[in-house]
Every structure is written in C-alpha cells, then in structure tokens.
Image (cartoon, grey):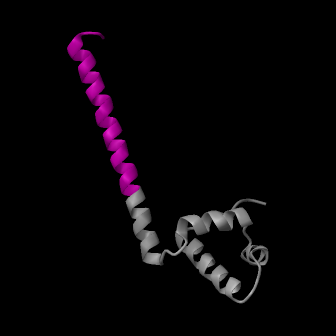
Amino acid sequence: MPRKRFSSEEIVAKLREADVLLAQGHSVAEVCKQLMVSEKTYFRWRKEYGGLKLDQVRRMKELEQENQRLRKAVSDLTIDNQILKEVAKGNF
C-alpha cells in the first residue's frame, strides 16, 4: 500500500477529529484505526502539531521555508568567503 503524505491542514483536522473521538470514550487504537494512521504517526503528529490552530500551522510552515532559504544563503556566502580566502593566499 503506497504511503499518503498528509498536508499540515489535513493533519490538524485529523487531530481535532481524534480529540473528539477520544472525548467520546474511544481508545487510541480505535481512533488511529478510524483515522487510518498508525499509533506512532498519531503520537508524532500530536507532538508536532498538538494544540496548534490552522493559521498557526500555516505560519510555522512559512517560517520553516524562510529559515531554509536563509540557511542556503548563509552556506553560499560561507563557500564564497572560503574561496576568496584561498585565492588571497595564493593556494590555488
């Protein structure tokens, strides 16, 4: 069976559904079976997205993308700096 990648919005919706089912007295195993995810996945999602609202998840994803872009920029500048230092020494 192929894996399905859930979006952040889908994960938050599934966690809310799980909270409702758990409040109704279902066990975690039953809830996971109904959501069609493993217990490990459920607990990992709950750890990462638990208590977040939809707008907070979107903002978190935007920040992650900006962080990734900035890390790439810093690494490019570091490489350029190292190349210039080597050229200045004459070790090419």
Position of residue 33 in the picture relative to residue 78 (left or right): right
Q: Nearer the viewer, residue 9 or 29?
A: 29
Residue 6: tell me if it is visible. Answer: no
Above/below status of 51 relative to 24: above
Quadrant of the rendered image containing residue 34: bottom right
Above/below status of 20 relative to 29: below
Residue drawn at (65%, 66%) of the image: 43
Which residue is at the far top? 91
Looking at the figure, which quarter contains the C terminus? top left
Is residue 78 highlighted in magenta? yes
Q: What's the magenta region? A: 65-92
Residue drawn at (28%, 29%) of the image: 80
Residue 52 spot, x, y in % from top left:
49, 74
Is residue 27 highlighted in magenta? no
Residue 81 spot, x, y in % from top left:
26, 28
Residue 53 spot, x, y in % from top left:
47, 78
Position of residue 37 in the picture relative to residue 57 (left or right): right
Residue drawn at (66%, 80%) of the image: 18
Residue 77 spot, x, y in % from top left:
28, 35
Position of residue 18 in the picture relative to residue 59 (left or right): right
Position of residue 27 in the picture relative to residue 70 (left or right): right
Quadrant of the rendered image containing residue 6: bottom right
